[in-house]
Amino acid sequence: ALLLASLAALISFSRAGTTLFWRTSDRANTAHHSEPIKFISVWILLAAAPLMSIFAGPISTFTDAAAEQLLTLSANPGLLLSGGGK
């Protein structure tokens, strides 16, 4: 039941998001200026997918290092409060 509720929520959020993102207004000027922005944003997302596959190793190494730093920093709150100085 929880899995179905999560699926229903995911579908409803995605439908609401696409409705808000692709909504057009009656004014021609705003619709005309937003078209290049939408086109460029879609192409950036499409270009990012293969790049993330090509550079999966370095991305994974970077995220692992960031997670390790976060876990290490949370072990000593004094580092955070002092600005990182020792």
Image (cartoon, helix red, strand yellow):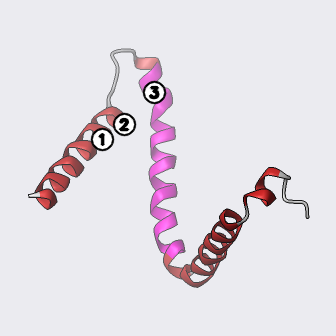
Instruction: Give the residue number, with chain letter if any, for mark 1.
Output: 18
Where is mark 2, residue-wise? 21
Which residue in the protein does label 3 denote?
32
Rounded to the nearest angstrom, the CA distance separating label 1 from label 2 is 5 Å
Q: Give the residue at x 77% y 55%.
A: 80
Q: Count the marks: how many?
A: 3
Please report whichever mark, 3 or 1, sits nearer to the chain's N-terminal start: 1
Q: CA distance from mark 2 to mark 3?
A: 15 Å
From the viewer's perspective, is residue 78 above or below residue 17? below
Identify the residue at image location x=64%, y=75%: 68
Front: mark 3 or 1 = 1
Mark 2 neighbour density, 10 Å: few (under 14) some (14–19) many (20 or more):
few
Tell me the SS state at disc 3: helix
Which quadrant of the figure contains the C terminus? bottom right
Residue 67 image offset from top left, x and y in percent: 61, 71
Left or right side of 6 for 25? right
- Between the C-alphas of marks 3 and 1, the distance is 19 Å
Amino acid type shown at disc 1: Thr
Q: Residue 24, how many percent across, how many down?
A: 33, 26
Report the magenta residues as a range.
Answer: 30-52
Kind of residue at badge 2: Phe
